[in-house]
Amino acid sequence: MESEDLDGFAVLVRERLRLRGGGRSTGRRLAEALSDLARAGALAPGARLPSERELAQMVGVSRGTAAAALNALCEEGLAERRHGSGTYLRQAAAPTGSPSFSGLLRADAVLADLSISTVPDPSHLVLPPIEVAELLRTPSGHGYDAMGDPRLRALLGGEVLITSGGQHGIDLAARVLLRPGDRVLVEDATYGGALTVFNRVGAHAVPADLTDPRATRAAIDLHRPALVYVVSVGNPTGDVPDLRHVAELARAADLVLVEDRSLADLVFDADPPEPLANLHPYGTVTVNTLSKSLWGGLRVGWLTAPEPLLARLAEAKQDNDLATSTVAQRLAAELLQLNPVARWRAELAARRDHFTAALAAALPDWTWTPPRGGLSLWTRLPGVDTDRFATLTRAHGVAVAPGSLFSPTGHHRDRLRLSYALPPPLLDQAVKGLTEAWHAHHRR
């Protein structure tokens, strides 16, 4: 490793050791810290690790302790010894290229996870006084209701297809509507999970300014997309754009429109935006979920679409998972009636204000546009590669989502999406960790 790289890696190792705490030998803690950093991608796959002497000096331990830690890393399969050359990180130990969106859900222990834009826990919910036996009663008996539990469907509007969350709904729409090589118009930035889905089916996400009617029309004429994907309340931006022209242009061009309304009920200063299916009723698939208003752990979402498209989506779902958990659906129906979204929206607005005030005080160089809705802050860090900075924040106990995850072209490398949905004490811990990481970055 070069001297500059060693200095930066030393900061990560020391901070990870601090977070690992005591209670075990220094050698064991050092091995765990190196394992954490290898899995997190603090070094590029195939990179040479510090030598025993270098590692001992950077951490302040004996050479034998450093050797034992490197041996433990090799035994885990994360590194390999090369005779006469040193110890190298294995190719599979860390992600290649930009971080993947699915990587946000990995189980690395952090003090505050700001990387996932969802309800962080179910503690805000009023729970129903319901017997377990009641959750098990279904009209079919076997629980494989293809379209979903009738009671939940009635609460959600009737002609809907229940899914296992919003991501499942986007995946179903992509598998039914797209073929390899198809183009999908998207905003830049947009929801990273959708970009992952489009890429998986072999489609190409094409960025366009969908907030501008002229730019939207020009993009449709130029790219001839198979569908247009829009997010009613921006994720990651928190914007609430007027997208009615997109529905009208899609209808005129006979294009399918997929509207992601996962955050539509979380607008702080206005009513939810009008569903675009009202303007393009025969060509709009609407994606929704309870993960943003009740709890992500329910894994319950729903799709609406015109017939016969809804039937095709239902058929694809049966091929995919047969049916969504009936118990989760019955519980969701009970929770919906006891937990109006307005209460969670007010609490979320208070957490947003708490977090932005603390962040502005601690990190005045960071900038953002106050979000009108959603769960996240789209933050700009001047002159910083946030793909790398996201690794550094993990070493300080905070998980964040780098901006490149939300761009079809890998842009926004100076941006972070930071969820403010956590309780205020955890948000305070997050600001502390982000501040430490920021100072560590500048020391490097």
Image (tube, rainbow, N blue to C red):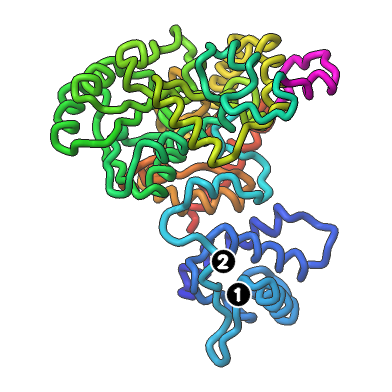
Query: Image height check: is 221 above or below 96?
Result: above
For label 1, the SS is strand
Packing grade of label 2 (10 A; few <14, some 14-19, many >=20) is: many
Q: Earlier in the sequence, mark 1 or mark 2?
A: 1
Q: Is residue 334 above or below residue 100?
A: above
Q: Position of residue 322 (x, y in %)?
A: 60, 37
Residue 21 located left or right of residue 324: right
Q: Which residue is mark 1?
A: 79
Segment colored magenta? 122-138
Q: Which residue is mark 2?
A: 93
Crowd around label 1: few <14 · some 14–19 · many ≥20 (10 Å): many
Q: In front here: 52 or 294? A: 294
The residue at 49%/73% (across/down) is 47
Residues at marks 1 and 2 touching, judged by CB atoms closer than 8 Å: yes
Give the amino acid type for the residue marked by disc 1 in the picture: Ala
| Residue 85 rendering spot, x and y as whole percentages | 53, 88
Q: Give the prevailing secondary structure in the magenta stretch.
A: loop
Residue 128 falls within the magenta-colored stretch? yes
Instruction: Please tell me whether residue 287 belongs to the stretch shown in magenta.
Output: no
